[in-house]
């Protein structure tokens, strides 16, 4: 016993003596310094501000509104109509489908679950839309569905990160950051990328879903709140008036300019731009975020109530922002994760509640953008981070009290409308059970490539140098979904 | 017996696949010997004879090895027997004649008969190797390989059919005038099979012992049985192999060949679904929405996937002066090329709502380049409209929330390329109908909260049927108040 103990101590000593430590410390720090001197991970010396920039190619869309239903809505209760699945409701899922597959909660052999909504075809396009979304059904001919979306992440946070940053791991710039980096903001008083969240919680991926990653931080999304102060911490403190604020910002900026001259770190320029933008936002943001001055018929249209923290308010705000030249407006609405573990998380009642909160506002957004002539130039994207299984969830192998579906990566539906996209079109098809895509398979990267294409970017050429190589949103993947382009 | 059924062993096939590599040796050697013999100088007679003899020896050796490997390759049974017969025996003859030439050059060098015989035999060997090589090429690549890309004028002279125009994604969408009366197999199915299947499944080459070039062979199937089960596309091997994931071993076409487009697969599937008939017309097969869209593409002769761009972007125009643009930017206008390295300009007054006609008149310096002009919420008036009429390539004009009226619209009548006109929240009224209808290229007009009436909008739509008129949302939601279930939630 004692012998063993001694051996252990000796072994421990071999691992890292003080001399070892100092030794590695020397070369370690030295090589770190060398690394940053030779291949520094700093950004190139381009002007880092949010001013207007020219797209590399002609683009039909000038701005994007991305409506993310965080938690992943069930495509089988909304848009992907599967009458055959209804026939097999309650039957065991064929083994072939689930062999070798991993699910977040489903264990063993689950039962199939028929659609828990009534479907009908709508408009000239003949899109199948369920009675959960009666308002959207009236806008059927404006929408193009992607029914063959798939992803490779079955948990919310990584899947949301993949959707918005092109990587399931933290650290990459988000789609909105790429867009505002590439195009800037038309409005000199507003940031190029703004974020609005509703449903009571931020998405699981957190603020990284609108982070700027290795892009200069001036391109990160600015989160605004539809209730209370729109942006936290930009109002003047008590006793500080606008003149003092302006003078202090000028002073800080001149110090920062000196620092930039000395060290040449572009992040310093980004910081200067942020101070200036924050100052401008003190007046511009409250103005754009104020919906109380909107006429009554607009409130009727959207179903908005000023002062509320609601998805509908955010839709109206998104329209206002786009109207004022904001490039990318990201909406998140939390609460679409219908596992069937509670009533509010069921695919019949619970999902319907979420639809009641959003359906009218989304439809109103499409109508309102169109009547202002903005829909031709605004790309609206709707979807979740993945889909839901055609099987009833059986968490811990038990039967659940409510109808619910597990996370599903093989097939889900998203839709796009507006700038650069064919109206009333559908691309991609799933099998008769809605389990997997049989044709028109489109990946998250394909969607990102298509969004960038509509804005005038070639996703393969749109890169940013970082740590010695060029990075792009779509990494090494992605193909523009040409059949849906108008 | 079992041994016979098992087909050729892997060893045989392994060496067989080297046949296309090795055959180039005798070809090159024979041509080299030919060139040396006819183009060397008279005084080097002795040296020439010796060198040529050695080359012929090696040529014949490599030819015999190639023949052996060729025989091994032929054991797959994928090749047309007639072509194969000639290729095989001509190949063997080439080897024999090369050997004879080597012998003659080496041992008969002094005799006169040899001189008389040598040249003709040399010519024969050259002709043989050419024909053999060509037949081999036909077996491997298909007999139309060499002429597949023969340019159009020459095709016409030699009486070949014009080559179908292939779209970017490899799809052929030939224009079919009366699509409903078109023959499904002959006009929709066969062209696809011809382009994407026939190169390996034809008279000369039958991969998997399958030919697809005639209806009879197509229905007969290959070594694994029939490939089409009429009425059951998902049971039919031909369709299954098209639908499976490209990474699967049995996916068709194999890696490296042009894949089928979704439209093409859909058409084949539709044809098999409805009986795989060889005589029926399009109108006789029930078409769903998806097939109808594809048929529409045939009817219009273009793949409808081509995005639309204004013809303006095909014009070549001069670039605007940088100083002029700078001057305009000083006014607060966004003045920028529509895309990098393009002369087409987009002008946007989003940051300069205070501008009036006087300041805006400076836009004349870039009027030749403006394709998009957004003057919404500015102080622009009818007085500025004649200047807009001087912007020859304007595609989009936004005048929402300005004091523009019917008078100003008259000036816009002659804009040749204007497609989108935003008059939302202006004084423009029914009196402008004639002016708007006269703008030939106009596709969309926004009239919400203008002085237009319902009747006026209807009249405008009637006068210009292709025009999309947006008059704002006037409808009622399908559900007046959708709070029933919200209340339930609150409980």
Image: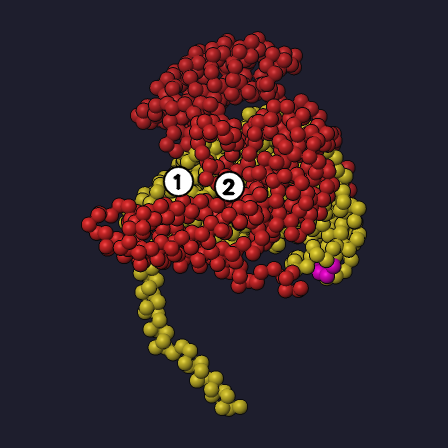
Q: Which mark is residue A471?
A: none
Q: Position of residue A51 (x, y in %)?
A: 40, 36
Name the front one of labels 1 and 2: 2
Q: Are marks 1 and 2 in contact (CB under 8 Å)?
A: no
Q: Give me the chain letter of mark 1.
A: A
As displayed, is residue A106 above or below residue A251? below
What's the colour scheme? by chain
Q: Indicate which disc residue A49 carries.
A: 1
In reply to whether residue B369 is colored magenta, the answer given is no
Magenta stretch: dominant secondary structure: loop
Check the rendered structure and report the hue given to chain A. yellow
Q: Name the residue located 39 percent from the left edge and 33 percent from the top edge.
A: B340
B121 or B481: which is nearer to us? B121
Tell me the tag on residue B143.
2
Q: Residue furthest left?
A: B43
Residues B309 and B461: in front is: B309
Tell me where the magenta segment starts and ends, as one range. A105-109
A113 relative to A5, above or below = above
Task: Give the percent coordinates (x, y) of residue A266.
Answer: 35, 47
Distance from disc 1 to disc 2, alpha carbons, whole Å, reads 61 Å
Q: Tell me if B99 is positioned left or right of A312 in this view.
A: left
Q: In the picture provided, is A130 more to the left or to the right than B166? A: right
């Amino acid at each position: 016993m004692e012998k063993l103990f001694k051996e252990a101590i000796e072994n421990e000593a071999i691992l890292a003596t003080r001399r070892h430590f100092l030794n590695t410390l020397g070369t370690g720090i030295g090589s770190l310094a060398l690394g940053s001197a030779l291949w520094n991970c700093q950004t190139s010396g381009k002007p880092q501000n949010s001013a207007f920039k020219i797209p590399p190619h002609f683009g039909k869309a000038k701005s994007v509104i991305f409506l993310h239903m965080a938690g992943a809505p069930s495509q089988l209760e909304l848009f992907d109509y599967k009458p055959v699945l209804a026939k097999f409701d309650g039957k065991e899922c064929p083994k072939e489908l689930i062999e070798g597959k991993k699910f977040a909660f489903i264990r063993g052999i689950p039962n199939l679950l028929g659609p828990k909504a009534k479907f009908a075809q709508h408009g000239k396009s003949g899109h199948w839309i369920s009675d959960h979304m009666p308002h959207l059904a009236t806008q059927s001919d404006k929408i193009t569905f992607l029914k063959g979306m798939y992803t490779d992440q079955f948990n919310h946070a990584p899947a949301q990160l993949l959707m918005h940053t092109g990587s399931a791991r933290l650290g990459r710039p988000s789609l909105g950051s790429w867009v505002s980096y590439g195009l800037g903001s038309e409005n000199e008083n507003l940031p190029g990328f703004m974020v609005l969240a509703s449903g009571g919680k931020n998405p699981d991926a957190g603020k990284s879903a609108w982070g700027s990653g290795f892009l200069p931080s001036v391109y990160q999304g600015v989160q605004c709140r539809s209730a209370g102060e729109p942006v936290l911490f930009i109002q003047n403190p008590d006793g500080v008036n606008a003149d003092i604020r302006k003078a202090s910002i000028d002073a800080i900026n001149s110090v920062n300019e000196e620092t930039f001259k000395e060290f040449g770190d572009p992040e310093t320029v980004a910081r200067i731009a942020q101070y200036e933008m924050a100052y401008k936002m003190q007046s511009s943001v409250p103005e754009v975020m104020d919906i109380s001055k909107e006429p009554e018929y607009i409130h009727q249209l959207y179903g908005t109530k000023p002062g509320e923290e609601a998805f509908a308010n955010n839709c109206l705000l998104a329209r206002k922002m786009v109207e004022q030249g904001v490039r990318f407006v990201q909406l998140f609405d939390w609460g679409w994760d219908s596992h069937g573990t509670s009533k509010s998380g069921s695919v019949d009642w619970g999902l319907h509640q979420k639809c009641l909160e959003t359906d009218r506002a989304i439809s109103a957004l499409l109508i309102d953008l169109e009547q202002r002539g903005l829909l031709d130039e605004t790309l609206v994207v709707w979807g979740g981070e993945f889909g839901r299984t055609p099987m009833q969830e059986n968490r811990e192998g038990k039967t659940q009290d409510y109808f619910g579906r597990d996370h599903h990566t093989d097939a889900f539906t998203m839709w796009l409308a507006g700038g650069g996209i064919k109206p009333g079109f559908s691309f991609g098809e799933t099998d008769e059970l809605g389990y997997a895509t049989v044709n028109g398979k489109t990946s998250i990267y394909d969607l990102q490539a298509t969004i960038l294409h509509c804005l005038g970017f070639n996703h393969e050429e749109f890169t940013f140098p970082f740590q010695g190589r060029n990075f792009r949103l779509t990494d090494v993947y992605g193909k523009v979904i040409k059949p849906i382009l108008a | 017996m079992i041994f016979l059924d098992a087909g050729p062993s892997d060893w045989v096939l392994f060496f067989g696949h080297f046949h296309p590599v090795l055959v180039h040796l005798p070809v090159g050697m024979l041509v080299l010997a030919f060139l040396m013999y006819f183009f060397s100088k008279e005084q080097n007679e002795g040296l020439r004879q010796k060198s040529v003899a050695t080359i012929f020896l090696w040529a014949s050796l490599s030819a015999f090895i190639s023949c052996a490997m060729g025989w091994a390759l032929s054991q797959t049974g994928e090749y047309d027997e007639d072509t194969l017969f000639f290729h095989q025996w001509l190949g063997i003859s080439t080897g024999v004649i090369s050997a004879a030439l080597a012998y003659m050059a080496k041992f008969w060098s002094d005799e006169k008969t040899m001189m008389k015989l040598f040249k003709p035999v040399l010519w024969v060997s050259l002709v043989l190797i050419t024909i053999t090589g060509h037949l081999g090429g036909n077996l491997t690549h298909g007999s139309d390989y060499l002429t597949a890309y023969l340019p159009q004028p020459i095709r016409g002279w030699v009486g070949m059919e014009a080559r179908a125009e292939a779209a970017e994604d490899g799809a052929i969408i030939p224009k079919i005038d009366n699509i409903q009366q078109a023959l499904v197999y002959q006009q929709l199915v066969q062209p696809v099979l011809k382009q994407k299947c026939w190169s390996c499944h034809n008279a000369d080459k039958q991969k998997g012992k399958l030919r697809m070039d005639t209806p009879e062979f197509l229905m007969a199937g290959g070594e694994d049985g029939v490939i089409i089960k009429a009425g059951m596309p998902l049971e039919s091997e031909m369709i299954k192999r098209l639908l499976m994931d490209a990474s699967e071993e049995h996916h068709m076409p194999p890696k490296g060949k042009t894949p089928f487009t979704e439209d093409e697969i859909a058409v084949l599937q539709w044809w098999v679904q409805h009986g795989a008939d060889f005589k029926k017309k399009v109108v006789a097969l029930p078409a769903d929405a998806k097939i109808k869209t594809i048929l529409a593409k045939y009817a219009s002769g273009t793949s409808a996937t081509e995005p639309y761009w204004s013809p303006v972007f095909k014009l070549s125009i001069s670039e605007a002066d940088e100083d002029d643009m700078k001057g305009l930017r000083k006014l607060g206008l966004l003045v920028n090329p529509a895309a990098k390295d393009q002369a087409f300009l987009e002008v946007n007054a989003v940051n300069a709502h205070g501008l009036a006609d006087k300041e805006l008149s400076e836009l004349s310096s870039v009027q030749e380049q403006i394709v998009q002009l957004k003057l919404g919420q500015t102080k622009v008036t009818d007085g500025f409209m004649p200047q807009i009429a001087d912007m020859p390539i304007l595609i989009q004009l936004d005048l929402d929330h300005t004091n523009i009226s019917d008078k100003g619209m008259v000036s816009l009548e002659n804009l040749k390329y204007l497609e989108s006109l935003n008059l939302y929240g202006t004084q423009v009224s029914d009196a402008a109908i004639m002016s708007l209808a006269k703008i030939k290229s106009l596709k969309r007009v926004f009239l919400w909260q203008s002085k237009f009436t319902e009747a006026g909008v209807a009249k405008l739509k009637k006068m210009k049927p292709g025009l999309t008129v947006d008059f704002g949302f006037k409808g009622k939601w399908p559900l007046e108040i959708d709070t029933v279930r919200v209340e339930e939630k609150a409980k």
